[in-house]
Image: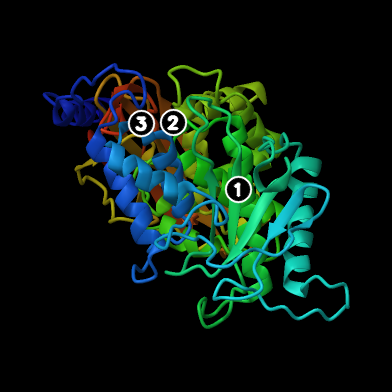
Amino acid sequence: MRARREIGISLLLGAALLGTVGAAAASAAPPRATISQATAARALRRVELLLDGRHRAQRPRELTTTLLRLARDLPRLAPGQRAEAKALLARPTDADDPGGSSYSVPEQPPYCTAHFCVHYVATSADAPSLFDGDGSTIPDYVELVAGTAEFSFNVENGTLGWQPAKPDGTKGGDARTDIYLNELRGELFGYASPDPGQGTNRSQFAYLVLDNDYSADEFPGTVAVEVLEVTFAHEYNHILQFGYDVLQDIWFYETSAVWMEDQVYGGIDDYFRYVKRWVKRTKLPLTRDDIKIYGSAVLDHWLAGRYGAAVIRTAWERAQEVKPTGFSLHALASAILSAGGSPLPREFARFVAATAEWRTPGVFPYSDGALYPDVKRRGKLHPGQFIKRRLSHLSYLLLRVRPRHVKRMKLLAGVRRGTDAAFALVCREGLVSQGKVTVKLKFAKNGGIRAVRLRKPGRCNRITAILINADPRQSGFLFGDWIYRHDHEPFAATLVLNR
């Protein structure tokens, strides 16, 4: 009788999924071949707004990737717009660009170390403090910036083994990476920008612009030295990324750069403010160009914790090799496999299951997990209740389940055939800080219905049901983004109790 009942429930789930229509077929044009003049013009206007102090930036770190878009889409602009874009992409010493970051007075002799040259002025709003407490003739702030830069180099290029920044020839004086101090506006922390005129080269050199003091008046609630440190670690990682490939997806740049902040300065944890927003956006795809991409550094922490920090570098080393051009998920998937991991859909599913109770020690392979905010649950799943939800690629949904004193609890869940998905029940026994977590996960390659069983659910203090769209496949590139084959897929689920 019980088996017959479960078959009936499975048939109902299947019926709920019948008749759904998949995503429309997309253009198979090469990446960025479909970028229009209007799309490029939007990047131009966005750069202007971000550099204008009157615009409040919700995402203060997005200027770098917006400049990157502008640089690689430069040929799409009309001639007049192209000249304007080149001025915005120019270094502070290169162009008269009142709307950007150009110096209004001659610069001082740059202060250079082994791998960097720091550029600054002695007067105007762009000047840093000229205080020279050690009598070296170099302002202390300039020396602080240079020391911060070399420390990041030692970690990113030394300890972690990323390839050196691509030399820029004689720009800025010589081939070393150039840092320009500037009075940034609009709550901008700093930015990196590829120099224009590098054509279609996928490996490009770039320069950095940092704020000239990081004063608490401009960055309330922060410590100036800490802001300088994490900003440099982040933006310098963009410089290194551009040396690997400038045609990758925006999320890939930001996720890696935020992850790098904590590798260089693990005690600052500035990225936690992005994780606070990330935990509320699990239904947004991993790749969505949203503030979520900064918090998605938690995925890199997961991967590095399982396979070592080199897996993130390997993804960038393979960026130019994978097909189609610029599809960053393939670069990441290739790196995971080379490290002995699973295919990306399965790896993503395991990562998702770990986020349900990542604050309990031993669940998440990175020590910061215990300090992360709880991931938001989006509703409850009751026994006998049928729910239907839509999820797009690499997104998921957590549902609250009330513990029951029965022999077994079963999650029956399904998704339309053809979609890589996963379903899980996660049980936490005891307190968050010292409990025991049991994860029951079923992967559904190419979709269908799966049953996830949890024994003695009454022992659990909290139970979470999880629906996961783990499918990363795409079918083309259109309007500046990939068209993912399994977006808005219908998921159905119910809960069965065996007494």
Helix, strand or loop at disc 1?
strand
Q: Is residue 244 visible?
A: yes
Residue ID for mark 2: 442
**If you read the primary sequence from the N terminus, does the residue marked by circle 2 or circle 1 appear first?**
1
Query: The N terminus lies in which quarter of the figure?
Result: top left
Residue ID for mark 1: 207
In the rendered structure, the answer to whether residue 456 lies left or right of residue 430 reads left
Say which of 292 and 186 sits in front: 186
Residue ID for mark 3: 75
Q: Is residue 13 above or below residue 137?
A: above
| Of the two numbered discs 2 and 1 in the rendering, the one whose residue sits closer to the viewer | 1
Rendered residue at 74%/61% (across/down): 109
| Number of marks present in the image shown | 3
Q: Looking at numbered disc 2 in the image, what kind of residue is underneath it?
A: Lys
Rendered residue at 48%/25% (across/down): 200
The x, y position of residue 261, in whole percent, is: 64, 55
Query: The C terminus lies in which quarter of the figure?
Result: top left
Helix, strand or loop at disc 2?
strand
- For the residues marked 1 and 3, what is the alpha-carbon distance in whole angstroms? 21 Å
- For the residues marked 3 and 2, what is the alpha-carbon distance in whole angstroms? 48 Å
Number of residues whose C-alpha sits closer than 10 Å to that of mark 2, classed few (under 14), some (14–19) or many (20 or more): many
The x, y position of residue 318, in whole percent, is: 60, 23
- For the residues marked 2 and 1, what is the alpha-carbon distance in whole angstroms? 47 Å
Number of residues whose C-alpha sits closer than 10 Å to that of mark 3, classed few (under 14), some (14–19) or many (20 or more): few
Residue located farthest toward the right when viewing the structure as drawn: 135
In the rendered structure, the answer to whether residue 381 lies left or right of residue 339 reads left
**If you read the primary sequence from the N terminus, does the residue marked by circle 3 or circle 2 appear first?**
3
Q: Looking at numbered disc 3 in the image, what kind of residue is underneath it?
A: Pro
